[in-house]
Structure formats: structure tokens, C-alpha cells
Image (spheres, rainbow, N blue to C red):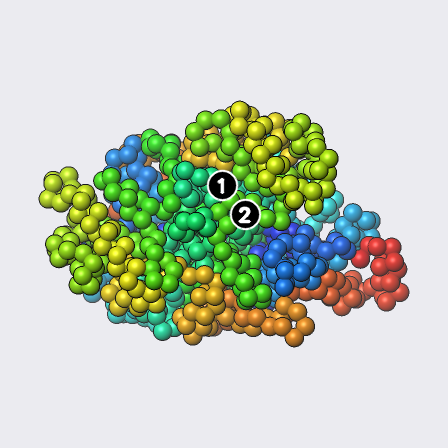
Amino acid sequence: MLDDVRVLEVSAPETMLAGRILADLGADVVVVEPPAGSPGRRLAPFLDDIPGIERSLTWHALNYNKRGVTLDLSSPDGKAMMRDLATKFDVVIEATSSRRTSPLDSIEFAPRTIRCTIAPFVSTGPKTEYAATDFTIMAASGAPAMTGDLDRPPLFFPVPQAMMEAGADAAIAALAALVARDRDRLGQRAQVSARIAAMMGSFGQALVPGSGNPEGKRSQGAMTIAGVQVPSVYECADGHTLITIGFGPVFGQMTQRLAKWAAEEGHADRRIAEINWPSFIGDLSSRKVSPSDLQALVDGLKSLARSKTKADLAEASRRLGLLSSPVMHMKDVAEYVQYRERGLFAPVSVDAGREIDTPARFAQFSNYSIEIKRSAPKLSEHSAEIFEKELGLSKTEMQALFVAGAI
Amino acid sequence: MSAPLDGINVLDLSWVMVGPASGRYLADMGADVIKVESSKRIDPVRTLGPFKDGKTGPERSVSYHNLNAGKRCIAIDIRRPEGREIILRLAKWADVVLESFTPGVLETLQLGYSDLKQRNDRIIMASTSLLGQTGPFAKGTSGVGTMGAAMAGATYQIGWPDREPAGPFGPWTDAVTPRFIVASILAALHRRSVTGQGCYIDTAQAEAGIQFMMPAYYEYAANGTIPERRGVAGSPLQVPQGLYPCSGEDRWIAIDASAPTHWDALRAVIVGLRDAKFDTIVGRLRNRDELEAAIATWTRQQEAAAVEDRLQAAGVPAHVVSRGGDLARDVDLRDAGHLNKINDPVFGEAEIEGPRFSLDRTALAPTRRGPRIGEHTNEVLAIVLGMSGTEIAQLSEAGILA
């Protein structure tokens, strides 16, 4: 879909998903790394737990479908080559650190170029100069404060998330500028704050005080309804399952079917199945039902879940239309028949002779398909071909640049 | 210059979060987004808080406004033939259609992609659901974002090893999936401007969630290791990187001084870290507990915001683990104009978020409130579809516009 679009990605952890989304959608994406390799190559986990510049699995996961060159952007030659390269590309993506200066600042981009910059905090704000890492940006997003148990510290994702959030929003920002350019042929600067991007996962916590409500508190995904702790994760025979108890006309119907099933299987009293769950909250105030009914449902579900496997519960969820799904680990994800048969995966190489199935197709299209065209570039893998074709460098010139450490 | 999607029309048949949040991105970019709702079957997000001043009511949900800011709303019963015909006529007007019905439902209503495409060959239609439109378990499966998180492998890994998985906060994949939908729609709009071709886009929320978990997925796929819950925040490969208690109830500071320059800066501030055994990375790894305790001893007596200020002044990456109140007061968000006042005729003032990125030439649309149920029904039918007052009155009489 973007096969007429060329993207130059000055590689940083935050740019990687942006470049990959654009590459998956058909753009020709070239990553620019310093001669020592992008910081993204030093992100865990590593192939066979052995570190190495070609062994970062995070690098592999977020850089396939791209080509790669090296340039020392602090050298005059690197800057000049970057400037010349930029004229051949539609979009330039970069991420600046806390200090706000970018090696691209000295380049005057053509009016048609789209420059998309990711920064930890917004470009004019008082936190502009903040030192920041993925971890501290996530702390500032509002999501961790709400994640986990109140008797223990907040929980973070085990995978850096600010770089994912920022990368995905940078892809959108670059594409928005591209669609604007389709109209008037002019490029522009797009800016993404990783912190604001990551706030998407806080589900509006910032709005809670301003609407006259007390701040939220974390509670292990459990809701407290009428004094009853309603968990969302239940232990089952071979792991855990997620069960959502909802009320109201839509979600309440699912709770109704759940209650009926628990009663049929002998884990809850028949009376629990006969309660009108869609109207439960309203009926509480008119005392038609009591919190103990909800407690009985929760207890019944705990007992029911323990008697079933993840697969049993998933099957019942499909059959009965419940808001329930297995808590999958990564082996479950890799083997899940729905993902397999739907065509989520495609093979990609992570090392000579080693292919894995990557969850390639984040979307499926009626007349386009995300395919794996190439695995993540090795360091400087495409320098020669790109510098020759785009910049007309001779073999002698390239060797001279290499000797000087500029590429 | 006008906003990038100025002149682009979007028919938003979706509800709850993923579809509406995608439509919000498009509205921020200047698209004319018409949300289709029915007072007989309101958007369930209207039943979710926070509610203005804690009082429930379908027009009081601040989450609703945050997800539907800048849209118009028409109330139509699309299950009636006359309602269906209005949708088909709006499909002719639309460049983009968003929908999040349980897979199979729109086809039953004869409002699927093929039906809409018959009226508008160039249409770009995006569907979102838990598991997608194809595959053995797709049809009839509905779901919410907590289920997406569970099926993306996220819930399993977030929690304490000695407890059940806690999972990420909220319906996590509802925050992830809109990104992939919007990027796909924008790419499709670009292609359409070149080739005239529309398309159908099918996203599964669980699959979108896996994208943000790719490093963990690769750990299994390449190394055969199933990543487990670690509980404690901070990477085992980076010291110090973690959370430290501050004075007050449930106050934490996140500090990441694992890079050598940051470590030197932190040491300059905290005297207790100057022991020679912390000189090297290996020394810090081997004495992690002691090192963390020394930092905690220093932070424990201080206010979290004061620790943030002191460490930032020294150049150490540190930030308060922000709660709602911290965010509402945050100087960075205030300065960016990210929190915008809206004035709603029903409940008065509240704040909602602004767009998630900025463009310097074709600025995005100003942040406006979300529409009330059916607020623009007459206006849309009359102006967009050119219906006469009599026609509209007849539809209203027949209960179609409710």
C-alpha cells in the first residue's frame, strides 16, 4: 500500500516499531545506525541468551522488512551523506533523547520531506530537558500506578512499552503527514511524545480528578462491587483463565449465561442462575438482590474454573458466548489454532539456518497482505548497495569512508 | 493549512473503545466522523466511568467524551430496513467505515463490506474484533480488551510469581489496537489517492496486542523459554532500575540509572552509593539488594516529587510513578495543552485529552466534546443525505431515529 513511499529511520528503540509498521505496509524502509550499531541491538532478550550485535531478539522482531546502513552522524561526511540521502526519501523518522538536540537539526530538509521526531516529553514543555528512559517514561504514563496489588509496588510490563507506544503513534503521525502531502505536495514536521503515547494505556487516569472523582487505586484487576471482591483471573486445572463479570444490557447477558453454566455444572446454587444479572446493580439498591448473591456467583466460578482446563473453559466460552478467555503464555500463543489458521504467522530468519514464525499480520486486507520480505538487517548489510545507488559513491570512496570510521 | 484529513468522511459504527478510539484519531486529524448509535442500544462506554462528579448517566461519562471527541452522532435503529438504508446511503458519503460488531453480525444485517462496496467502490472499511473475521473461532466471538491482553500473552507475564497473574491495567488491547487500525486506514487512504482502490481491513485485538509483546514472543519462539512473571519492576540486566518508596501512602519514584553516565550522576547525589563495590556493573549486579536498599533509604524520607526534582537536576532519569492526580497537575501535560477543558450542556465542565501527536503545518483539529446520543441526526439526514423535513419526520414517527 505504501510501495511508492521511502522511509529513512535513524534507528533508536522508539523508532523501531514505527519503521516496521511502515515497512509492513509496503514502504521501502532504510535504517541508519552508527558504525557501532543501533542501541536497539543491545535490547534483551538475546538469541540463546548469548549477547551479540546480531543477537538481540528485540532488534530482530522490530526490524524485519527493512534494509540497513551505517553512518557516523557526528562526522562531516556522515552528515553530508545523511543530507543527500534524505533528498531521496519521503519520510525521516528519528528519536531525540532528553537533551533535545538531534544530529538532523543541521540539515535543511526539502519542502516535501516529512520529518517525524519522537521525544520522551513534549518539545516545548518544562520536562523537555528531563533525562528519561523507557522505564521512567512508563512511570509517567499513569498505567503502572494502577497495575498490580496495593500491598506491593506497582507493576510494569516485562517488555519495554514506551518505545512500542511511541513507535506506533509515530507511524500514525508520519502517515497523517503523508496523507496531507498527497493533497498539497508539502511535507512537514511531526512530533510524538513517548509519554503522551504511553498514556493511552492509562485509560484516562489524568481525567479522573478533573471530573470530580477520587483518584483510582490499583487492585489486581479485581473490582470491588457492593463490597464483594470480583476477581478477573481465576485459577484453573492447568493455569489461569480470565472471566469478566459485567452488568447492564450487553455484558449482563454474558454473566447470565455464566451463572447458568456454573449452576448446571453443580458449582453454584440454582438460585444464582435465576437472578436477573443484567439489572443486578439497579436491583441491589431496591434490595431485590444482595451482595451475598454476587459472592455466591464468584465462589461458584472459582470452583467451576478449578475443575476445568484452559481449553475446556475456552471451548465453553465460545459455545456459551462468555467474556472469558485463557490466560495464555507465549507457548500457547505460538500454538493457538486460531492464530495459526487465520494466518497471523509468517517465517522469518533470526540467524543463519534458523527460522521462527513471527506474528507478522497485525491486520489483514482484502487486497494487500503483510509479508516478510527480508529479515532484520545485519549491521551495515546494505551500506554498499544503498550508498552506490543513492549517493553514487565509488568503491574507493566507500573504502576511504570506512577507513576513517564514517561508515 | 487545514488538518490532514479535512474533507475525509468517516462512518463510525463501532462502540466501546477500539473502534471509537480509532475514530477519535481520525477526528483529531480533521475527518468528519459520524458516530452511529441508538438510544435502544447505547454505546456501553457510556456506562463506564469516570462520570462527572461521580454521578452515573449515559451523558455523564468522561471516558465517552475522551473516545468520541469531535464526532457527530446520529441515532438510528440499523436493524430496521429504513435504518439499514440510511447506513447504505451514508456509506456512499463515507471514505472510511469503522465497525466493531461481533463477527458475522453485519453480514446478517446485510451491511457487510460487500454490501457497502456495492454503493461505494472506493470505500475503506475497517473491522475490529477480539479474534478477527477469519479462522476457526472468529465468527460469533465477542470480547473485551482484558481478554485480548490474556490472549496476547501479556496478562500471564504481569504479576507476582507467588500470586495469580494481575494482568495489565484495564482493557489493555483497547489501547493498542487503534494504532494498527489507524495506520492501516491512513496507508489505505494514501494508496487510494494513487490508485483509486479502497479495501477491507480486518484487525484482531488479541493479535494487535502481541505486537507490543514481540520481544517476549521471540524469547519463546527462538529460545524456547516461556517468559514468566517477575513481579519486581526493572530489568534483571539493568542496575539500578527500579521503584523506590517515598514518603506518603503508596508513593513511588522510578529511577533508571543503569547507564554509566546516569550511574555516576546518581552517585554524586546519594552518598550511600559511593562504596567501591558499586564501582562496576558486575559489582552492582552482585550487590543489587544492598544497592537498592541504599537508594530506598535515601528516597523513603522524601516526597516523590522532590526526589524527581533533585535527581533530574543531577541528570538522572527519574520520574514519579504518576497517579491520576499527578497527571492532572503535570506541568508537561499542562504546557502541551494535552488536557483540554470541554463544556458540556448536560454536566458542565470536564477535561479530556488532546491528540497524541502534533503536526507543525497542517495542525490537528481543536479538541471538542463528544456528541450526545442522536445530537446530529436531523442535521446529518438533512444536509449529508439531503432528506426533506417530511421524510425525516416519517422516519422519526416510525421509530427509526431512536
Give x and y (percent) for residue B257: 64, 39
**Taking A117 as reference, is B223 above or below it?**
below
Amino acid beneath label 1: Ser
Quarter of the C terminus of chain A within the rendering: bottom right
Q: Is residue A382 left or right of residue B316?
A: right
Q: Is residue B363 visible?
A: no
Amino acid beneath label 2: Ala
Q: Is residue A295 left or right of residue A231?
A: left
Q: Are marks 1 and 2 in contact (CB under 8 Å)?
A: yes
Q: Which residue is mark 1?
A: A141
To the question of a shared chain for discs 1 and 2, the answer is yes
Give x and y (percent) for residue B346: 26, 35
**Taking A149 as reference, is A125 above or below it?**
above
Residue at the image position 47 percent from the left and 39 percent from the top: A153
Residue at the image position 57 percent from the left and 29 percent from the top: B297
Give x and y (percent) for residue A399: 87, 63
Q: Is residue A210 left or right of residue A41?
A: left
Q: Chain of mark 2?
A: A
**In which quadrant of the rendered view does residue A288 lie?**
top left
Label 1 Cα neighbours within 10 Å, binned few <14 / some 14-19 / many ≥20: many
Residue at the image position 73 percent from the left and 66 percent from the top: A382
Q: Which mark is residue A162?
A: 2
Q: Quick one: B369 or B59, which is closer to the camera?
A: B59
Label 1 to label 2: alpha-carbon separation: 9 Å
Q: Quick one: B43 or A345, which is closer to the camera?
A: A345
Label 2 Cα neighbours within 10 Å, binned few <14 / some 14-19 / many ≥20: many
Residue at the image position 19 percent from the left and 43 percent from the top: A291
